[in-house]
Amino acid sequence: MEQIRLSTLEQHLHKIIDSVNRSNKPILITDGEKLLVKIVPASPPAPMSWLGCMQNTGRILDDIVAPVAETDMWEVLSG
């Protein structure tokens, strides 16, 4: 993994960021022997799934437990 001194980062930040994005490899930023930061390329966003895409969009407008019609109107229930 490539290491770059902090003073170099300050002078060539744009080039270093381009290099990380092109090579897709992280770069370590150091100050002397001390590791300060690890610059890693951003991962591409995960594709959206159609599962759950309508989550929290529905509303219950009325009683969902009560029957729609009286049971004597249903042939199957009048037996």
Image: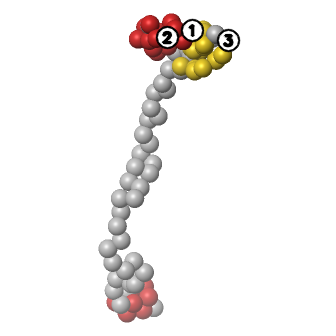
The type of residue carrying mark 1 is Arg
Query: What percent of the width, then of the height, locates residue 46?
Result: 47, 34
Which sits in the foreground, 22 or 35?
35
Query: What percent of the width, then of the height, locates residue 61?
Result: 32, 74
Taking 63 as reference, is 79 above or below it? below
Q: On the rendered structure, is 2 left or right of 16?
A: right
Residue at image coords 60%, 20%: 36
Mark 1 = which residue? 5
Label located before the other in sequence (1 or 3): 1
Residue at image coords 41%, 55%: 55
Q: Quadrant of residue 3?
A: top right
Query: What percent of the width, then of the height, locates residue 47?
Result: 44, 35
Crowding around mark 1 (Cα neighbors within 10 Å: few <14, some 14 to 19, many 20+) is some
Disc 1/disc 3 C-alpha distance (Å): 9 Å
The type of residue carrying mark 2 is Leu
Mark 2 = which residue? 9
Crowding around mark 2 (Cα neighbors within 10 Å: few <14, some 14 to 19, many 20+) is some
Q: Secondary structure at mark 2?
A: helix
Mark 3 = which residue? 33
Pointers 2 and 1 in contact (CB under 8 A)? yes
Q: In the rendered image, is residue 16 in sight?
A: yes
